[in-house]
Amino acid sequence: MKRLIVSFGIVLGLTNLVQAQQPISYNLYPQNSFLLNPAAMTENNCFNAFINRQSKWADLSGGPVASTFGLNGKIGSNSYLGGMVVGDKRSLVSYFTANLMYAHLVKFDANSSLALGLSLGVANNSLNQDMVNTKDLNDPAYSIYNSTRLDAGFGVIYNYKKLKAGFSVPHIFDQFGDFSSQYNVNLAYDFYLKNKDWKVTPMAMRRNYKEVGGLYDIMGLATWKEMVSGQLGYRTDKSLIAGIGFNWKMLRIAYAYQYHVGSTYNAFSSAGTNEIQLAVRLCRSEPKEKAPAPVADVNADKVTTTVLMTDEKYGTPVAGNIVITKEKATVYEGKGDPSGKSTFHLKPGKYTMLVTAKGYLPQQETVDLSNEAKGSKYEIKLKPIKIEKGLVFKFSSVNFETGSDRLKTSSYEILDKMADILNDNPQMVIEVAGYTDNVGDDNNNKILSEKRAKSVAAYLKAKNVKESQMKTVGYGEANPIASNETEAGRLQNRRVMFTVLEY
């Protein structure tokens, strides 16, 4: 019993090895953060396996040696499964842990996510009997260092763009029941150089372990093309850490060396800490996206029709509204862009186009695409007329039954738009003047022209236009605009003219 206590006292005084299960102070965690945090399984979607070996004070017989084996992989859309086995021999005492680990990734948006990791397993510590001279295996001091218990841990990692923040508790339960003082907190940020070949990651970490208290790491990791990496840092136990790593296809090998500067460690060994890691990463190639099936051109059998509208007097672009109808059914309705351009697709055929724009007269045109080839282009240039006082105009689509003052139904659409203008501008006053050709009695023609003017005014009145906004007059066969010698000329002379008296 006495020899056991003396042996333990020597080791406690020199190396501080016999303690609650102090987590291993890994130095290669910048290149494999799974060593510290089970939530790190979510950092890639590959199958990962590694062996890590750390030896302290290589020139000292019986120096601490820790071997770690881990593997993990993705098992669901956002779920990961892994495990880790650790054997840690510290002179008189050996520690062993085996844990199954699970992690889940929560994606908030394209820039941020939260990873949660848990570990559960068993931990065992045992006394290396070949190094202890004791005959009483029932001695209470002996049993303290031979025990098996439940082991558990957890970790979280928050990612925001290139920033990563992590927190982990490696062992919630230790043999003395005090886990609150054991944790890791780390921050890292990725910088990419202009050519994207180099990634530089500065990182900081606080380790808080029961027996050694708080330690801080300031570390930098530089990676070139995901092939070569180097790390350099300082730990507040007065030690420098340098490391290098190489990736080749699915294999990675990394090495780190920790050298203590003027610390108590050098009192009995000048050698530092060596750590080496061999890892394998197997990634399933992402399925190639199938080339989208060629989309049939729905406009292949149509005529691409473009309408360009400019002010008739001033030449400025007019962004008008366009309605295309065929046999009274609307087939297109849209508005031109600021340049006065509208583009749409129509099957070959004959259409009616009605164009309106604020402050301009409505315009109705026939669009005949009957002889246009499918897939061809057709352009129409229109010159809308700006409404101003003194403007005189007519609508070619306003017509009457032969020898009658009854409006044809084809006149209604354009007159409806004229009614809208008058209703939107109650100060506007127009003259509605009727004209005829020279066929028939002059007096009868004058009476007919008056009736036709009043017929137009009556229609507008029925569309809520005030009587005070309209004046009607009939001019008969006066002021012809075409020859009365032909039917085409006489058709043009049988007309209704509008004059803007007030605007």
Image (cartoon, rainbow, N blue to C red):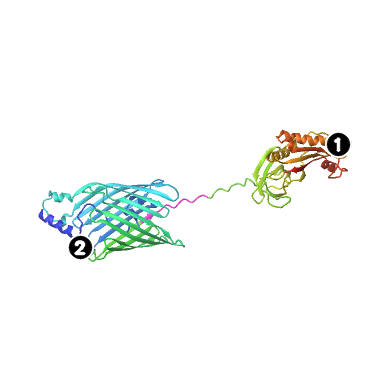
Residue at the spot 28% in from the left edge and 63% down from the top edge: 239
Q: Which residue is mark 1?
A: 445
What crowding class fits label 1: few (fewer than 14 Cα within 10 Å), some (14-19), or many (20 or more)?
many
Picture coordinates of residue 70 (x, y %)? 32, 53
Q: 310 or 241, which lies in front?
A: 310
Q: Is residue 263 above or below residue 35?
A: below
State the image coordinates of residue 360 (x, y, percent, origin top left).
Answer: 70, 45
Residue 139 within the magenta-colored segment of the rendering: no
Can you say whether 168 is above or below 454 in the image? below
The label on residue 61 is 2
Q: Secondary structure at mark 2?
A: loop
Quick one: 171 or 313, which is closer to the camera? 313
- Please, is residue 365 above or below residue 30 in the view? above
Decide which of tag 1 and tag 2 comes sooner along the chain.
2
Give the residue at x 82% y 36%.
Answer: 450
Residue 283 falls within the magenta-colored stretch: yes
Q: Would residue 370 be found to the left or right of residue 26 on screen?
A: right
Q: Quick check: can you spot residue 295?
A: yes
Q: Nearer the viewer, residue 279 or 117?
A: 117
**Mark toward the viewer: 1 or 2:** 1
Q: Position of residue 75 (x, y in %)?
A: 38, 46
Say left or right for 480 vs 267. Answer: right
In the picture, the quarter occupied by the C terminus is top right
The amino acid type found where label 2 is placed reads Ser
Residue 148: give its label: none
Q: Name the kind of residue labelled 1 in the image.
A: Asn
Q: Which residues are magenta?
A: 280-290
- Looking at this rendering, what residue extends furthest in the right direction? 441
Q: Secondary structure at mark 1?
A: helix
Find the distance from the CA under tag 1 to the CA under tag 2.
130 Å
Left or right: 25, with 281 as reference point:
left
